[in-house]
């Protein structure tokens, strides 16, 4: 497994894996109800990771995932260097890192007691993550599409295409939907699916980066 593949894999496992483990622990400790949140939206992601042991797992896992997101964007910048310009790659990385920082801030303020949580910071951070990530991934997809036409080998191209179509379909159909402290069942369902699509998009680079063995300092070069 190359360095790039390990980053893609860990970005997925630390984000989606943390959410899955957190939800399982929350159910076992009685702080979340048993259901399929992807279908009935019985709970949002935030409230599965606030109380008990689930809260510690959620905060620790998501903060670690944010670090891997930042490295993922650095590697993506380097991977696309031969087929795209520095401005477009810089914008892509800027919004991607900004989204990760939004998630970091929104996660850091979560506390077991709902009244003690800084909901303004959490809500802004969560929305910055989803909106910033949509912009960053959209730029990334366009650059990947252009790079593929220029000869870049992208084994996951069609998977990325499907994921981008699903993310934009959600955005268009449910325009104006934002993450909040108290959300309807429909908004919760959207949150779960959007998070999964973003996680799988990160994972999709596992197939593209089989020979990517850059260190972080090299990836950061323009």
Image: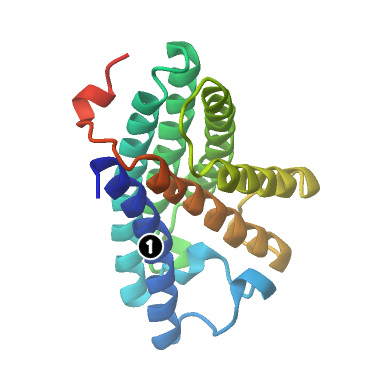
Q: Give the vertical position of 183 relative to 80 (above or below).
A: below
Q: Nearer the viewer, residue 188 or 197?
A: 197
Residue 130 is at least partly visible in this image: yes
Residue 217 x %, y %: 20, 25
- Residue 198 at x, y = what percent? 52, 49
State which quadrant residue 101 falls in.
top left
Q: Of 152 and 141, which appears nearest the observer?
A: 152
Q: Give the colour scheme of this rendering.
A: rainbow
Between 203 and 194, the one lying in front of the other is 203
Tell me if I can see residue 109 in this picture: no
Figure check: 63 above or below 134: below
Residue 112, compared with residue 147, is above or below; it is: below
Quadrant containing the C terminus in the rendered view = top left
Q: Secondary structure at mark 1?
A: loop
> Residue placed at 19% from the left, 31% from the top?
215
Count of marks placed on residues: 1
The quarter of the picture where residue 35 lies is bottom right
Q: Residue at x 28, y 51 (%)?
A: 64
Furthest residue toward right: 173
Question: Looking at the picture, how far across and down is residue 25, in whole percent?
Answer: 38, 80
Residue beneath disc 1: 111
Residue 108 rendering spot, x and y as whole percentages: 35, 51
Residue at 44%, 74% (x, y): give it: 23
Q: Is residue 91 left or right of residue 37?
A: left
Q: Is residue 48 left or right of residue 36?
A: left
Disc 1 crowd, CA 10 A, few/some/many (<14, 14-19, 20+): some
């Amino acid at each position: 497994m190359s360095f790039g593949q390990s980053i893609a894999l860990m970005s997925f496992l630390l984000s989606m894996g943390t959410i899955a483990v957190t939800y399982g622990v929350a159910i076992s400790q009685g702080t979340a109800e048993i259901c399929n949140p992807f279908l009935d939206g019985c709970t949002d992601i935030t409230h599965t990771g606030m109380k008990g042991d689930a809260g510690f797992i959620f905060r620790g896992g998501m903060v670690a995932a944010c670090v891997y997101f930042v490295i993922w964007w650095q590697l993506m910048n380097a991977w696309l260097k031969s087929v795209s310009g520095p401005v477009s790659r810089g914008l892509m990385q800027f919004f991607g890192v900004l989204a990760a920082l939004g998630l970091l801030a929104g996660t850091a303020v979560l506390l077991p007691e709902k009244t003690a949580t800084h909901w303004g910071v959490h809500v802004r951070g969560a929305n910055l993550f989803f909106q910033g990530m949509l912009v960053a991934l959209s730029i990334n997809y366009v650059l990947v599409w252009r790079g593929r036409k220029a000869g870049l080998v992208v084994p996951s191209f069609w998977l990325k295409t499907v994921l981008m179509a699903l993310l934009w379909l959600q955005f268009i159909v449910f325009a104006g939907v934002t993450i909040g402290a108290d959300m309807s069942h429909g908004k919760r369902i959207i949150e779960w699916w959007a998070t999964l699509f973003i996680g799988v998009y990160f994972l999709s680079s596992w197939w593209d980066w089989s020979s990517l063995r850059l260190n972080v300092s090299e990836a950061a070069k323009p």
